[in-house]
Amino acid sequence: MAKNHVIVLTNLKSKIQESKLPQHIAIIMDGNGRWAKKQNKLRVFGHENGAKSVKEVVEASAEIGIKHLTLYAFSTENWNRPKLEVQTLMKLLVSSLKKEMSHLHKNNIKLNTIGDIQSLPKKVYQELMDVIELTKNNTHMTLTVALSYGSRDELINSLKEIAIKVKNNIISPEKIDESVINQHLYTHNLPDVDLLIRTSGEQRISNFLLWQIAYAELYFTDVLWPDFKKQDLYVAINDYQQRERRFGKTSEQIKTTQK
Ligand code: FPP
């Protein structure tokens, strides 16, 4: 790495204010296919390099002190991709988990999943369970991987569970509030998302954490996911820290409460 580049990187990282860190960052990792195509390679090559960016971003987040990182790795809609691509993504998941489990554990990172993980191939499911079990008491950061995840599915499941509890007189309808809904989502153990990043220039949410991003700051970058490295995360966090989060209040109200 060139010396100047190292200086820029250090500056970007050191500009991050610890007191204003997003507690929860969620990322829509997009652009693997286009990245591969640009190099006349198969889409699979893009995913393999995307896995390298996953490693970078997990490391960078843990180094800075982010408490929750959630990655959209496979959506409910992704099952409709060509069979070979789905198989490759599943293999990549298993190999990445195998390769990284001790590294995650050593760095006190807890693995968590959201989505219909029962629908994953047995091998993937088992590997996930092993890493979840190994890392369950870790406290430095929670890494949540969204797999076979769809936010509408998640909301439907949660509403069904609540409806059953109402029917069985476990919850009364008047008691249903945000916290009851939160408790029935896959993300029941996670705080709301503060910063949502999407790579590759697309500016949409694609059925990801619709409820949980109600007050998230959205950050879109043209960088394709396999090119997204530590410095790109620092840029996103620096951008986030320049914003004023008002949660529906006025700018004046926010400034008064900060005094
Ligand atoms: C989107 O790019 C990416 C995916 C659907 C898969 C994301 C998977 C990884 C980054 C690899 C492994 C993940 C882990 C957690 C180890 P795309 O294929 O939609 O790209 P395109 O829009 O350019 O076609």
Image: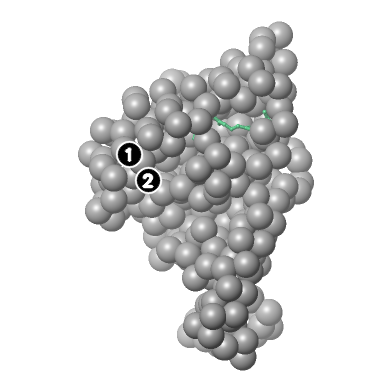
Image vertical order of residue 112 relative to residue 170, above or below: above
Q: Quadrant of residue 72?
A: top right
Q: Which residue is mark 2?
A: 111
From the image, which quarter does the N terminus lie in?
Answer: top left
Q: Does any portion of residue 63 appear in the rendered image?
A: no
Q: Which residue is mark 1?
A: 131
In percent of width and height, residue 219 lies at 65, 51
Badge 1 crowding class, 10 Å Cα cut-off, few under 14, some 14 to 19, many 20 or more, is: many
Badge 2 crowding class, 10 Å Cα cut-off, few under 14, some 14 to 19, many 20 or more, is: many
Dot 1 amino acid type: Val
What residue is rendered at 34% in x and 30% in y?
100
Dot 2 amino acid type: Leu
What residue is rendered at 52% in x and 58% in y?
186
For the residues labelled 2 and 1, the Cα–Cα distance comes to: 7 Å
What residue is rendered at 51% in x and 43% in y?
117
249 relative to 111 in the view: left or right: right
214 relative to 193 in the view: left or right: right
The answer to which of 190 and 246 lies nearer the viewer is 190
Specify the farthest residue to the top. 40
Local secondary structure at mark 2: strand
Residues at circles 2 and 1 in contact by the CB criterion of under 8 Å: yes
Give the mark, 2 or 1, whose residue is nearer the N terminus: 2
The answer to which of 153 and 171 lies nearer the viewer is 171
